[in-house]
Amino acid sequence: MSRFLAALLVLFALPAAAKAPKLTLFISVDAMGSDLLLRSRPRLTGGLGRLLSTGAYYPYARYAYAEARTAPGHATLATGANPWRHGIVDNDVYDRAAGQAVQVYTDPTHPVLNGETPPGSDTSPVNLMAETLADRLRVSTQGRGKVVALSYKSRAAIPLAGRQGQAWWFDEATGRMVTSTWYAKAEPAWMQAFNARKLADATFSKTWELLRPRAEYVGDDDRAVEPEAYGMGRVFPHALKGGLQAPGPASYRAFAVSGFSHDLLVQAAKAAIEGEGLGRDDVPDILAVSFSGTDAVFHAFGPYSWEMQDTMLRLDQAMGELIAAAERAAGGKANLVIALSADHGGAEIPEAWAQAGVPAARLNPVEAAKGLAQELKAKFGVDVTVKLLELDVYLGGKALEDGKVDAVAVRRAAAAWLAKQPYTVWAVAKDDLATAADPDGLVAAMRRGYYPMRSGDVVFMARPFQVISDYPRGTNHGTPYSYDTQVPVVFAGKGVKPGLYLEEINPVDVAPTLSALLEMGMPASAEGKPRAEALTGVR
């Protein structure tokens, strides 16, 4: 049969099956790069492993912008757009008026509901400049379709909920799931009951043990490059008390890093399903769950650690329970759609890379900023404040604000100095970003991630294997290289053609594909497209 005839048969068959799923389960796994998942897959026999085997699995999706971070990654998955449209350029941005870094979803007018709100912390989607999949569902169903987003991180839950859903995240000060006054005026009964269970407290006296026999883990448990994080120790088993005598912020932080963190989110998801009645009627609902524990393990212990190997095994188990709960809520697999992806990947601990002969190094942004400030003082004779946030450089100071020096000249001088540093591929002032030559294609990635109101005065590109971090241990992410930007994408359930799809796609395609499965229009600013081959089976 020709491709053309096959496509026609599929098209003629669509109207009879044109009914949106009752429930969409949208899963994000923080810091689960393609390499991590591919290495873990042979041992995944639970929900995650089954999802890969029964869904439309794309191992090689790649973000097309430069700064692979949690906030922009989740915003891109939710909107189908790059940061130059949705405006979420990084986890933190520099507030020039306040002279300090703030979280990108900060909104002082909408504090945390029934809790303390640290200054400059994420609380609402007011800074998200594009419509999300959740918002499109709410509009399309005239407010009847429900959306609940859950994560350990507010910067993950907020974009997945959009402006019109519900967002809940874990508060490490209290060990509770919280939201802000943007999303609720009072805590619903189902969340009150869930928080009353105090699941984070229940693990205080437990230790994080290996799930499998030690012989099944690759490499060494005790690596000198790993930190003594959160009072947990460097090797298994890990204590979760955080050095406290009773549950408190330090123990909640250790809990968030542990493999037990996945279970709390699954229990919260089950409470949301029951409390909100998700999947009960023919109006489609969305349940979004972003597992953040993988990212916490990644930053502390690295992607090749025993801790990461174990947390992937525990995630596999937890995801099986989550998917089973979603299937029950929807009345069976025939009424459920699942999407899985990640916000970014991540680099190995640079010292471990260096030991293996990789040209890796730790780039301290504080020291780099000091060097640049000294250069600008020598060149222009005035003090210029310099703040490096990942690949963005923010310049300020009274001389610039009062116009005593040419701001464009200062920015270009800063870019010229940065470009000469051994850790840099290139640097460019914002004035020249649109016209800069792009022989290696990396400038285009920086442009897609640049939003003038929030991005830096100068942007630069670090060389491969340069890990930007002012911490002496652990690791980071945030570059356009494959270890940071390459992530998996999986679609499964109603209307999806299972298979292994090896073409490289862009995560901006996730929201449009879900829109097609939900029988509705795409989010307004979406740049991606539905993955037709995963819906029709025709390539």
Image (tube, rainbow, N blue to C red):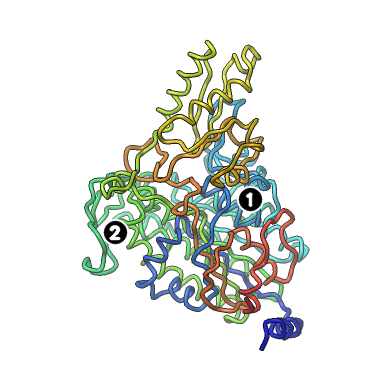
Between disc 2 and disc 1, whose residue precedes? 1
- The x and y percentages for residue 189 are 58, 60
> Which residue in the rendered view is the most extreme toward the bottom?
1
The residue closer to the viewer here, 261 or 114, is 261
Residue receiving disc 1: 82
Looking at this view, name the residue that lies furthest to the front: 439
Residue on which disc 2 sits? 306
Distance from Cα at disc 2 to Cα at disc 1: 34 Å
Q: How far across and down, in percent of the image, does residue 317 sit? A: 40, 70
Quarter of image, res 459: top right
* Vertical arrangement, residue 512 with respect to residue 492, above or below: above
Residue shown at the point (37%, 45%) measured from the top left: 475
Q: From where the camera sits, is residue 210 visible?
A: yes
Identify which residue is drawn at 62% across, 43% down: 447
Q: Nearer the viewer, residue 4 or 530?
A: 4
Q: Amino acid at mark 1?
A: Asn
